Amino acid sequence: MTIRLLLAILHLLALGVGMGAVFARARGLRKPLDVDGVRRVLRADAWWGLAGFLWISTGLARLFMGTEKDTSYYYANHLFLGKMGLLAVLLVLEVIAVVALGRWRRSLSGGAVPDTSAASRLAIISDVQLLLVVLMLCLAAGMARGLGTMAG
């Protein structure tokens, strides 16, 4: 198996795992948040984090190793630049979730019940992130068909 194929497979697997995880996180945040409910949210969040790490690391490898196209192709592609803009928005939203859910993790590890008053806001953030991933997927599909190049 070539590195090109392996990176593509891992990139796509991360997409599926991540979409399922962020959906599960949003859904869990809308359910009763007793200790078990919080743990379910944190498990989904951990999968979302793992998928994000895998997705970004394989994406960077594909970009800078030139396994698909030369790096200059991506920098000259409107759809790629749009995808990166959406990723930036997604990451800014994730900082909010990481801070809040980090507090929940610390509370649980200290034996306390976390303050879940931000759950509805975090659910909305998760929904928006899922939408951003879908939009990024649409842009990626366009790129795979040669759309978005500045020359054409």
Image: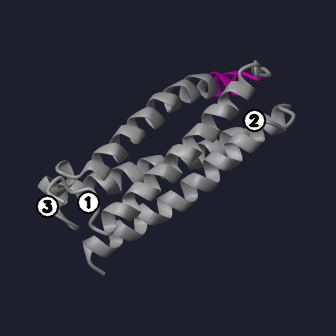
> Which residue position holds label 3?
70
Secondary element at tag 2: helix
Q: Secondary structure at mark 1?
A: helix
Q: What residue does disc 1 label?
A: 62
Q: Mark 2 or mark 1, which is nearer the start of the sequence?
A: 2
Residue under circle 2?
29
Secondary structure beneath dot 3 equals loop
Residue range of the region highlighted in magenta in the rendering: 103-111
Q: Nearer the viewer, residue 119 or 128?
A: 128
Q: Earlier in the sequence, mark 3 or mark 1?
A: 1
Q: Quadrant of the C terminus?
A: bottom left
For residue 74, side relative to residue 42 (left or right): left
Checking the image for residue 4, the label placed there is none
**Amino acid type indicated by mark 3:** Asp
Image quarter for residue 149? Answer: bottom left
Q: Amino acid at mark 1?
A: Arg
Q: Where 136 sits versus 69, above or below?
A: above
Residue for point 21% across, 54% down: 74
Which amino acid type is shown beneath numbered disc 2? Answer: Leu
Q: Quadrant of residue 137?
A: bottom left
Marks 1 and 2 sit apart, C-alpha to C-alpha, by 34 Å
The one nearer the camera, 52 or 128, is 128
- Residue 27 in percent (x, y) is at 75, 43
